[in-house]
Image: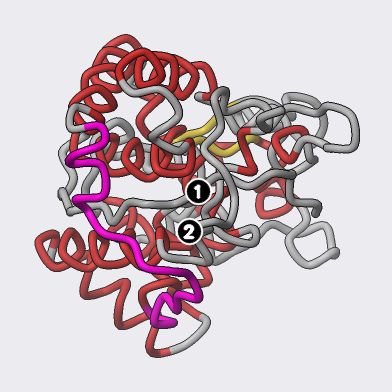
Amino acid sequence: MTENAYYSPCLRSFYNGGKSTGGYLYPQFYDHSCPKAQQIVKSILAKAVAKEARMAASLLRLHFHDCFVKGCDASLLLDSSGSIISEKRSNPNRSSARGFEVIDDIKGALEKECPQIVSCADILALAARDSTVLTGGPSWEVPLGRKDSRGSHTIGNARCTSFRQRLYNQSGNGQPDYTLDQSYAAQLRTRCPRSGGDQNLFFLDFVSPTKFDNSYFKNILASKGLLNSDQVLLTKSEASMDLVKKYAENNKLFFEQFAKSMIKIGNISPLTGPRGEVRKNCRRINT
């Protein structure tokens, strides 16, 4: 399971305590107002992932990117219009953030079942959980009750441009990054030349790219972390190195702590109560 280094932010979130500055969320939020909500999300998501396995990681990544920029409020889903500049079209997200059509399908089904009840922010949170489960990862109860923002934030697989410097010019001296396993580096150079091929996609976890497991951490221990931000988890501090080793050795522990981290991430500055709105269409604010 790939689409960007989602393990890394989750690991850092857990290590940093996953501080929440938001309101009160709880898993039973839609039990009476839209009792079929979670079933609908899971059903549509399962079809999308069955059609394209990579979609699971893409949707998990959307939840991360939404939450880590000023909170979990579905700002990432907004299209540009009027005074709103789309966050999804910003340089870090352009050509990499994807899965918006699946969210549209889920929202459309939920609007038919229970109009303007389930927020787009909660859809992202549920989709992240179900994407993890569908690819063999852990499950958890998703706290719900987020509202959607009324404006955009300003601000997986990895593309060749994300790690080219490690292959050819890590420190500005024209030399590769020798902390990267050299046989692995040679393999990467075949599809990531010094120039060209910028958008060529590479698995972050080449061992089990469509399965949710702890191979990511095993790869780091073998000096085969694709991105520099991955490999630094082993070298930055003893604390992060210890976690990498623990997760590489114990898949059960990784699953348990990943689930806890996802709950903490989903609690980053949610809009609740009278703050925000429940969008009718996830791509634009209500009028």
Q: In the rendered structure, find residue 84 and report the number of the disc placed on it.
A: none
Do the CB atoms of the residues marked 1 and 2 lie less than 8 Å apart? yes
Q: Which residue is mark 1?
A: 147
Disc 1/disc 2 C-alpha distance (Å)? 5 Å
From the viewer's perspective, is 287 left or right of 180?
A: right
Label 1 crowd (10 A; few <14 / some 14-19 / many >=20):
many
Residue 136 vertical placement versus 227 (above, below): above
Residue at x 47%, y 45% (from the top left corner): 63
Q: Nearer the viewer, residue 45 or 284?
A: 284
Q: Secondary structure at mark 1?
A: loop
User: Which residues, given as a range, are shown in magenta?
Assistant: 15-34
> Which residue is the extreme one toward the top?
51
Residue at x 64%, y 26% (from the top left corner): 283
From the viewer's perspective, is 210 left or right of 104?
A: left
Q: Position of residue 228 (x, y in %)?
A: 59, 61
Q: Quadrant of residue 109?
A: top left
Q: Position of residue 37 (x, y in %)?
A: 25, 30
Q: Amino acid at mark 2?
A: Thr
- Examine the structure image and report whether residue 26 is included in the region drawn in magenta: yes
> Which residue is the extreme one toward the bottom?
238
Q: Which residue is mark 2?
A: 272
Q: Nearer the viewer, residue 161 or 55?
A: 55
Q: Amino acid at mark 1?
A: Lys
Q: Secondary structure at mark 2?
A: loop
Q: Quadrant of residue 1?
A: top left
Q: Position of residue 235 (x, y in %)?
A: 49, 79
